Amino acid sequence: MTIRRISSGGAFEAKIGYCRAVVAGGFVHVAGTVGQGDSVEEQCRSALEVIGKALDEAGASFADAVRVNYYLPDAAEFELCWPILAETFGANPPAATMIECNLIAPQYRIEIEVTALAPA
């Protein structure tokens, strides 16, 4: 089985020892991704942009997503992201889970993790 690693060059990748995405076993596994900005909506859009770039580099897109996990320190903020997520996944919604938990730093309000089918 071939494994391909995709790095976004982010500071945490080298510091912690992970990469943005791994293509293996017919899937693209995108690491949990936080975004930049002040509001949960800005961070959601920013995280999705980073994820979209990783999927694109793997030859996939959001239309290929089969699973997504959302992590938020405040579950009440998740509803603010729904329109953004509905627009992103459109007619191809993946299976999804939302978990309320602490994130790596207090300024982060959402982290998103995606699994997508890899191109054949």
Image (tube, grey):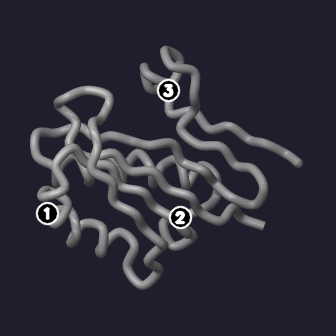
Asked where in the image residue 107 lies, by quadrant, the reply is top left
Provide the secondary structure element on which disc 1 rests: helix
Q: CA distance from mark 3 to mark 1?
A: 29 Å
Three-letter code for the amino acid on which mark 2 is drawn:
Ser
In the picture as drawn, the residue positioned furthest to the bottom comes out as: 91
Disc ID at residue 29: none
In the picture as drawn, the residue positioned furthest to the right comes out as: 1
Question: Which residue lies at the image location 68% right of the left edge and 37% below the top edge?
Answer: 5
Which residue is label 2 attached to? 61
- Give the x, y percent position of residue 82: 22, 69
**Which badge, 3 or 2, comes first in the chain's sequence?**
3
Three-letter code for the amino acid on which mark 1 is drawn:
Leu
Of residue 54 and residue 85, the one placed in the foreground of this image is: 85
Disc ID at residue 80: 1
- Depth-wise, is mark 3 or mark 1 nearer the camera? 1
Three-letter code for the amino acid on which mark 3 is drawn:
Gly
- Depth-wise, is mark 1 or mark 2 nearer the camera? 1
Instruction: Specify the quadrant that holds the C terminus.
Output: bottom right
Question: Which residue lies at the image location 36% right of the left edge and 53% below the top edge?
Answer: 48
Tell me if label 3 and label 2 are in contact, CB under 8 Å.
Answer: no
Which residue is label 3 attached to? 9
In this orientation, does residue 46 appear? Answer: no
**Which badge, 1 or 2, comes first in the chain's sequence?**
2
Q: CA distance from mark 3 to mark 2?
A: 20 Å
Q: CA distance from mark 1 to mark 2?
A: 23 Å
**Which badge, 3 or 1, comes first in the chain's sequence?**
3
Question: Which residue lies at the image location 38% right of the left edge and 50% below the top edge?
Answer: 112
70 sits left or right of 115 in the view: left
Of residue 105 and residue 46, the one placed in the foreground of this image is: 105
Asked where in the image residue 11 lies, by quadrant, the reply is top left
Tell me if label 1 and label 2 are in contact, CB under 8 Å.
Answer: no
- Give the x, y percent position of residue 64: 57, 70
